Amino acid sequence: METFKTPLEAFSHWLQKDPDHIFLRQPINRKFIEYSRQETYDQALCIAGALHNMGLKQGDPVALLSKNCAHWFMADLAIMLGGFISVPLYPTLDKDSINEILIHSESKAVIVGKLDNYEAQRTGIPNIPKIGVSLYGVDEAYTWEDIVKTATDFQPFEQHPEDLITIMYTSGTTGNPKGVMHKVKSFNQVINTGIEVLEIKNHSKMFSYLPLSHIAERIGIEMVGFYTGSTVSFPESLETFAEDLAFVKPNTFFAVPRIWQKFQEGVLNKIPQKKLDRLLTIPIISGIIKKKIVGKLGLTEASFCASGAAPLAVSLQEWYNKLGIEIKQCYGMTEDCILSHFNLPRTNKFGTVGKPLPGVVSKLSAEGEILIKSDCLMVGYYKSPDQTAAMFTEDGFLKTGDLGEFDHDGFLSIVGRIKDQFKTDKGKYVTPSPIELELSKNTDLEHICLVGTGISQPIVLIIPSEAGWAKGREVLSKSILGSVDVLNPKLKKHEKIEKAVVMKENWTVDNGLMTPSMKIRRNRIEAIHQPMYLDWFSRPERVVYESN
């Protein structure tokens, strides 16, 4: 396995080795447009030259606003070839958030690619050069297509390990986004480490759909694609996602827990659990059923499947394992460049996030907070020295904000987040994450948020799944109470759930109640609903419907 010093060195290696190899596959109107490594490089070099011709200098920040697509990769390559610093923006941000980040980052230009509603976001971009990709209906004074028609003699930047490669603004479950700065060497080390220990093969088929503005997708798909000479395909839309995934059949697949839950719901909608359990006990039939389900999911060739961003229930891992899909749970964050903990091939312990990766030292503080040290830690938060200093201990460990426990074999389990803890009127703290994880075993529940500030016992706010709603209120209520009544005897007295509240409005990225990586924004949910806690708590029924 080749090792490299920079992403540009890795891309150059594969470019010289096989320039005609298909690197990117972009579906448009149900047909794939394919870009070879040479075509990708040529277009990126033209964009890099155009940015310099617009007056940008090496070291200037350049923003990238787009959903996952071939031009995201090409744009990021262009930013590196030009010696600029990339500032990826989540494609779901509203105009005010876009404006705030572009001004704070001092971005000198922005490349705009595939978006759902660019017109609603456009006014958030200040008076800086904008390059739009016409293929996705983004028309600006500078168009990607016009630029790449012009030959360039631009001399590409030579990337060095100590160069600042990016400012990545966190999606933020609490507070305002902060710009995390990383050097080239951080990206390089985590990729070379990950490829080796996770046994990722060269020339893999990859599928990119989680936000590339999130560190996990950027490292795990984009950078791994650069370093392994792989081919990366994209979904055309949310509606075609399942079809596109099944067609691509990626060799590696990473998902957040909510997606694994959605896949499970889809299977159980067609084959009820009792019937599935029965079929899986019958020789020959069992193999046929497994093959059919895994094929429908598009994971027949996925030798490596992983989950991260939030805890994954052991019951869900076990469910997939019965189908022959072994999900490896991992843990990391933007600030440590996701070089942290991972369950590895042949050492996968369900319910944990694995052991520290090579080069990582981890420990717990006196309060149980997970502390991380490695050579991949962030340079700091952009223009925020005080916030940066607050993230580190005196001996240089990163404070993750997560509570953890190590077992006797050294495997780490995430207990919850320090900031998520709340205190009931009884004056005792409750950590919601493990309780929510237990409740998530119920496939009738899509999102769960345990709360209790200002009342004497916790209550749980629930967004039912489609399957849950389809059962009607009476059956749904029994399902919810069944889960609560099974769980309550296992909880301490001050943790026991008093009531469940079924919310009338879904929590989504668009309404600001979910992060782009599908984690609930607990502080925003609480800000909206806390005034109702006492009223809900005082009602006679155990399952309260918000619309009542």
Image (cartoon, grey):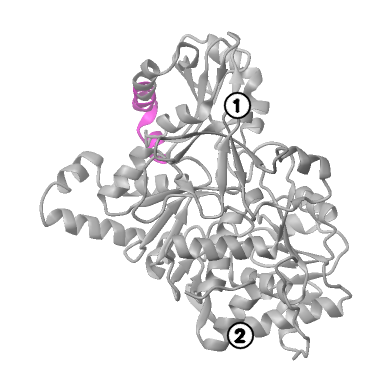
Q: SS of the residue at dot 2?
A: helix
**Against 493, is 353 above or below?**
below
Residue found 80% across the figure and 51% down from its top: 382
Question: Which of the pair 516/415 is nearer the observer?
Answer: 415
Q: Give the residue at x 59% y 25%.
A: 421
On screen, 398 above or below 203?
above
- Determine the residue positioned at 50% across, 73% down: 228
Against 281, is 70 above or below? below
Task: Estimate the x, y position of residue 373 in percent, counting from the top left.
Answer: 62, 47
Residue 449 visible to the viewer = no
Q: Amino acid at mark 2?
A: Glu
| Residue nearest the viewer, comparing 127 with 451 | 451
Distance of mark 2 from mark 1, alpha carbons?
53 Å
> Where are the magenta residues, as a range?
466-482
Q: Tally the numbered discs.
A: 2
Q: Residues within 10 Å of mark 2 (few under 14, many from 20)?
A: some
Residue type at mark 1 is: Glu
Q: Which residue is mark 1?
A: 367
